[in-house]
């Protein structure tokens, strides 16, 4: 069974405010005499649903096209962890949701329900974030990919000190765990 968990790319779609807006425009049109209809897209690699490669936070590390296809295919488990806005997800939350189902090599899909807030200002600023202890739990369980239904496993830029950066990203990506962000439909 194939389940699409990605957001549809649209012009001016919701994303981190520091990125340029997504542009979708027609550059050729049958109606205007062109032999085909053709669209052009302008977006960052972090627009919509995407996977962060280690290079995202670690200079000299692997970029997405350098990773073998096998890194993106394999067994997975959905963990439901619902938190209030601005709450933290810690190791105990993951342990309770996993109920012993997470095995080494699994992809963990973290269902927070936050995708239901897409389109609201809270989606960008109030999503629950993982603690470093939660990141360590994923590492201890041999997880190969963390996928979640919000913008990031780290605190939003508005809620973190500039010098803190992206510690969960660095911990996971620095230890070979890819991060898929902004999924929808995990429920």
Image (tube, rainbow, N blue to C red):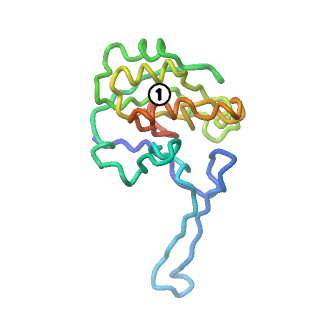
Task: Report the number of discs.
Answer: 1
- Quadrant of the snapshot with the C terminus: top left
* Observer-nearest of 153 and 22: 153
Q: Quadrant of residue 177?
A: top left
Residue at screen point 59% across, 69% down: 25
Question: With 170 as the anchor, is 126 left or right in this view?
Answer: right
Q: Position of residue 106 (x, y in %)?
A: 31, 29
Q: Is residue 112 above or below residue 9?
A: above
Question: With 179 as the anchor, is 29 left or right in this view?
Answer: right
Residue at screen point 65% across, 55% down: 12
Q: Position of residue 125 (x, y in %)?
A: 68, 33
Q: Classify mark 1: helix, strand or loop.
A: strand
- Quadrant of the snapshot with the N terminus: top left
Give the class, few, some or many, for how many residues have Cα within 10 Å of label 1's Cα (few <14, many ≥20).
Answer: many
Residue at screen point 71% across, 30% down: 161
Q: Position of residue 101 (x, y in %)?
A: 31, 19
Q: Quadrant of residue 156?
A: top right
The residue carrying mark 1 is 111
Q: Position of residue 146 (x, y in %)?
A: 42, 32
Q: Is residue 72 above or below residue 25?
A: above
Q: Residue extending furthest bottom?
A: 33
């Amino acid at each position: 069974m194939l389940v699409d968990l990605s957001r549809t790319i649209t012009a001016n779609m919701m994303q981190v405010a520091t990125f340029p807006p997504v542009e979708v425009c027609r550059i050729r049109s049958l109606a205007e005499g062109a032999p085909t209809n053709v669209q052009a897209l302008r977006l960052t690699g972090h627009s919509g649903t995407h996977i962060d490669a280690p290079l995202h936070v670690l200079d000299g590390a692997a970029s997405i096209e350098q990773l073998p296809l096998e890194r993106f295919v394999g067994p997975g488990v959905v963990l439901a962890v619902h938190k209030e806005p601005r709450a933290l997800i810690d190791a105990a939350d993951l342990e309770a949701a996993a109920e012993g189902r997470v095995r080494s090599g699994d992809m963990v899909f973290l269902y927070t329900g936050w995708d239901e807030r897409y389109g609201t200002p809270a989606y960008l600023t109030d999503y629950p974030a993982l603690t470093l202890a939660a990141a360590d739990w994923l590492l201890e369980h041999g997880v190969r990919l963390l996928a979640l239904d919000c913008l990031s496993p780290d605190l939003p830029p508005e809620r973190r000190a500039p010098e803190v950066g992206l510690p969960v990203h660095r911990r996971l990506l620095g230890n070979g765990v890819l991060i898929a962000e902004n999924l929808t439909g995990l429920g």
